Amino acid sequence: MSHTIYDIARQAGVSIATVSRVFNKSTKVSPKTRDKVLQIADQVGYHPQGFAQGLAARQKKVIMAVVPLLSNYFFLQVLSGIQDAISETDFELHIYNVKPKEERIGQLKRLLGRKWADGYLFVSTHLSNEEWEEIHRLGQHMVLIDDAYSASNYFQIDNKQGACKATEFFLEKGLRRLALITAEKNSIPAAKRQEGFLETLNGYGVDTDSVPIVTGNTTYRDGFNESNGYEAMNKLLALDPFPEAVVCASDIQAIGALSAMKEQDVEIPIIGYDDIQLSRYIGLSTMRQPMSKMGYEGTKVLFHHIDDEKADLVQEAYIPELIHRSTTENIQ
Amino acid sequence: MSHTIYDIARQAGVSIATVSRVFNKSTKVSPKTRDKVLQIADQVGYHPQGFAQGLAARQKKVIMAVVPLLSNYFFLQVLSGIQDAISETDFELHIYNVKPKEERIGQLKRLLGRKWADGYLFVSTHLSNEEWEEIHRLGQHMVLIDDAYSASNYFQIDNKQGACKATEFFLEKGLRRLALITAEKNSIPAAKRQEGFLETLNGYGVDTDSVPIVTGNTTYRDGFNESNGYEAMNKLLALDPFPEAVVCASDIQAIGALSAMKEQDVEIPIIGYDDIQLSRYIGLSTMRQPMSKMGYEGTKVLFHHIDDEKADLVQEAYIPELIHRSTTENIQ
DNA sequence: ATGAAAGCGCTAACAT
DNA sequence: ATGTTAGCGCTTTCAT
């Protein structure tokens, strides 16, 4: 059933070296033999085995994207950027899902040690500096997307600046009684967003001691889930008076918050974060992050580093853009 | 930087065979040597390279899930089932994204020919019988999820029955002027759902010639997108009188349809299809499919076939379940 | 332009 | 319990 390079060589009446050359697009093969080899290969469905190629050539022609698939809403956009960049090459993209339940660092060390790929794109794989250090020591080419580590390439989002922008928008409109729906404290993006929120308020002379900062009780996905937003909003709606506007740590929570408002028949302006696909549909104003671009650029940088071992590190931070939709329409 | 089994063997003062045994959990190693090897390996961050292992052992310990990531809303649930089943083993899951723009069959033949994995799970990778035949001939272990091919294992959804159930629900409530929002004709699931819709109407003696069957003009993702549903609903709302209830080919279209209704301030009962995560949140009634279960069971079957070359084929079709939410609440 | 042969890093008999 | 050695399927000099 399974053919090797020997079978093809024998049937084509050439040596295995020639068959190899054909598949590696070497010019040093006569068109006649090339065609013959290709024809036979096609007939029996032969293709060089990735494993053997990888072993012999020490190039696997594989890029691996490491993603916590199930705990993230925008990886699809990142992935589409990655896929675009990879499609321009003869590399293949393999995706590895880091299991959230299991210890991350162990999984990753094992994965990289197995050397499946020529380079790794870590998408939203938040690790501590010490953990990244351990990973980095494995000496594989890597680019972080949506995280940062000083000794590696990374494309990050300036979470703090994003929150600043959202907060500033409300403040500029003259609103002062703002509230924040945040997520779990241990989430770095959530913490950064909160920081931006508070600093901006401070900058406008608002006393931040009494500012309501709430989160729901549902901690699944670090609190980045609809129920959490729903619960959080209900906490805000228990206040008297209500906040005049709400900055929210994520679109998904904002969606929950909106349904809480709907239930109580109130409309408080709110800005989410992430610009997930759905937000456009429900008219949620939000902070958009250039996810696809980060995927694309990150992959480019990865290839660059694979080609040139000692290329300079690339470290960038993008600032999110405020997208206005109906949830910021009726201010004043 | 990169260590091989020889480095470890030398440093531990043993042969490479022993090192290999340690990593393959052979019992025939004294605890003392095992510890020593493990300690040294850990120190330098050694792990057997997947490529070399795969080549030598003819087992890669890798399962590959082939998914059209960007054109599907429920693969995440399937994936979680797959991941669960794989976590019970010492296999790894790699995910391959079939690019929708490029010719599918070529991509897949090349992928399977490269023999990256011991088995393949094709999720929602709809191909023609002839194409599956071509893939099947490559002699790799495979299970189809959300598609069917007679010579292979598959776990399918009975799209027709699902549509029947939804349609029947409305008919049983006494409604007769039903409409269908469908997707592109070339989409097999869409076609099956339409078939179920029409047959059920026929069964109830409704004249199907004048039944409105519409789709939007946005054909992205075979019409499975919000805009399509929005456009389709507007077509229905141009009718006089309106339909009494709408069966919709997908939740994502139903979401678009709902926003069209909202704009015109009408409320027509509607049932979606897929039960995507969001539907619960917006109260969309829908046909739920056991995606996670299919992923789990499919993976189990795949392993079974890897272990036992001549295990019997497993072919199943699940019937979706009608989930009632607010969009079917106010009937009559 | 083509072939012969030496690895790539590992596993799995077969020895001891 | 441990070592020796022959491959696994391919790429890549080095010949010719």
Image (cartoon, coloured by chain):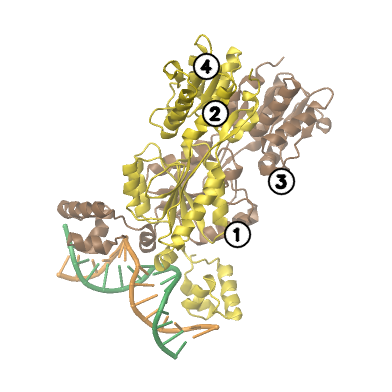
Chain colours: A brown, B yellow, C green, D orange
Which residue is under mark 3? Answer: A186
Q: Where is residue A298 in the image (x, y as percent from the top left)?
A: 49, 43
Q: Where is residue A128 in the image (x, y as percent from the top left)?
A: 65, 52
Residue B177 is tagged as 4
Q: What element carries label 1?
A: helix
Which amino acid type is shown beneath numbered disc 4?
A: Arg
Residue A57 drawn above or below residue D14: above
Q: Picture quarter containing residue B223?
A: top left
Which amino acid type is shown beneath numbered disc 2?
A: Ala
Q: In which quarter of the image is the C terminus of chain B?
A: top right
Q: Which residue lies furthest to the top in this view?
A: B240
Marks 3 and 4 on same chain: no
Residue B166 is tagged as 2
**From the viewer's perspective, is the residue at label 3 or at label 4 nearer?**
4
User: Contact (CB < 8 A) between labels 1 and 3?
Assistant: no
User: Contact (CB < 8 A) between labels 2 and 1?
Assistant: no
Q: Residues within 10 Å of mark 1 (few under 14, many from 20)?
A: few
Q: Picture quarter containing residue C5?
A: bottom left
Q: Is mark 3 on a helix, strand or loop?
A: loop
Which amino acid type is shown beneath numbered disc 3?
A: Asn
Which residue is under mark 1? Answer: A106
Q: How crowded is mark 3: few (under 14 residues within 10 Å), some or many (20 or more)?
A: few
**From the viewer's perspective, is the residue at label 4 or at label 1 nearer?**
4
Q: Earlier in the sequence, mark 1 or mark 3?
A: 1
User: Contact (CB < 8 A) between labels 2 and 3?
Assistant: no
Q: Mark 2 lies on which chain?
A: B
